[in-house]
Image: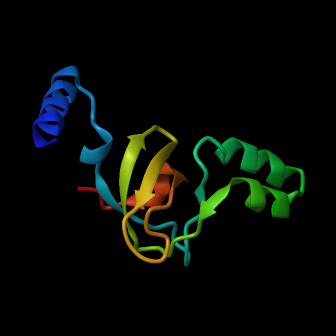
Amino acid sequence: MIKRVAAFTLAASLLGLQPAFGGLICTLDNGGEATLVFRPGKMSETMKLHDEGMNEESVRCCVACLPKNGVKVIITDQGFASHTIRVLEGPDKGCVGDVPAEHVKGCH
């Protein structure tokens, strides 16, 4: 298994790709108490429902979890306006979803 992971990491590196398991470790921080993590691909649907006054439906449909700020996450897919992350600690550990890029800070 280790040889397979090493080979994939080398191939991804040569192709200029960043494998999901080699992502950036960061901290969630939106300046509030917690950060909404949206189910993957549901961020724009959430905004549309919210704009139509359907707040309860937008939460039921599209929110994956609500981790506290300061929680460590790993970016599994880095985008321009949003990132797909996996929560690494706390009660929401394992939650996967999208957050606005500006809510992810202190990456290394």
Measured from the top left, where is residue 42 in percent x and y?
A: 66, 45
Residue 10 or residue 29, whichever sits in front: 10
**Considering only vertical position in the picture, is 73 above or below 52?**
below
**Considering only vertical position in the picture, is 44 above or below 71?**
above
- Corner quadrant of residue 38: bottom right
Q: Measuring 81% from the left and 54% from the top, which residue is drawn there?
A: 50
Q: How is the image coloured?
A: rainbow
Q: Measuring 50% from the left and 76% from the top, which residue is drawn there?
A: 68
Measured from the top left, where is residue 34 in percent x and y?
A: 55, 73
Name the image quarter holding the N terminus: top left
Q: Measuring 12% from the left and 36% from the top, which residue is drawn there?
A: 6
Residue 39 or residue 80, whichever sits in front: 39
Position of 61 with respect to 13 (left or right) is: right
Name the image quarter holding the C terminus: bottom left
- Corner quadrant of residue 57: bottom right
Measured from the top left, where is residue 99 in percent x and y?
A: 53, 53
**Considering only vertical position in the picture, is 4 above or below 52?**
above
Residue 89 or residue 16, whichever sits in front: 89
